[in-house]
Image (cartoon, helix red, strand yellow):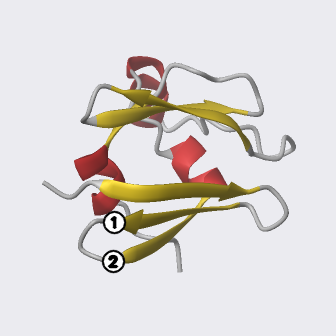
Amino acid sequence: MPYPQTLHSDTATGILEIVWDDTHRQRLDIALLRRQCPCADCKSLRRQEINVAAPWRPSGIAEIRPVGAYAAQIIFSDGHDRGIFPWIYLRSLKQDP
């Protein structure tokens, strides 16, 4: 299983950069992370085709907390804090074109 060596959130660019233990460098748009939050509430809203992140409210990351050795809890600047992002899930996300 891939494991991140570093996670860096850049508010100015709106990017979360992850460097993995296999040296892969991944750059993810924070708004993408917010839209793809894996919590039950956000999944339900996506199934109903409701935008989980209000477009008028810029997405940022307030804090990243480790959850054991398998995931991170990402707390977004809009106050949303329910998403637990397993490392394997983060690694699978592709940047929007």
Question: Is disc 2 placed on a helix, strand or loop?
Answer: loop
Q: For the N terminus, which image quadrant?
A: bottom left
Q: Which residue lies under the disc numbered 2? A: 24
Residue 54 quadrant: top right
Residue 87 at x, y = what percent?
A: 29, 47
Q: Is residue 80 left or right of residue 84?
A: right
Residue 79 at x, y = what percent?
A: 73, 22
Q: Is residue 30 left or right of residue 22?
A: right
Instruction: Name the foreground residue: 34 vs 20.
Output: 20
Residue visible at 58% across and 42% down in the picture:
34
Residue 39 quadrant: top left
Q: Which residue lies under the disc numbered 1? A: 20
Residue visible at 64% across and 23% down in the picture:
80
Instruction: Name the foreground residue: 5 vs 75.
Output: 5
Q: Count the numbered circles shown.
A: 2
State if disc 2 and disc 1 touch (CB < 8 Å). Answer: yes
Question: Is disc 1 placed on a helix, strand or loop?
Answer: strand
Residue visible at 84% across and 40% down in the picture:
57
Residue 70 at x, y = what percent?
A: 25, 36
**Kind of residue at badge 1:** Trp
**Kind of residue at badge 2:** His
Residue 11 quadrant: bottom right
Residue visible at 51% across and 19% down in the picture:
82
The alpha-carbon separation of the residues under discs 1 and 2 comes to 5 Å
* Placement of 3 over or under 40, stated as above or below: below
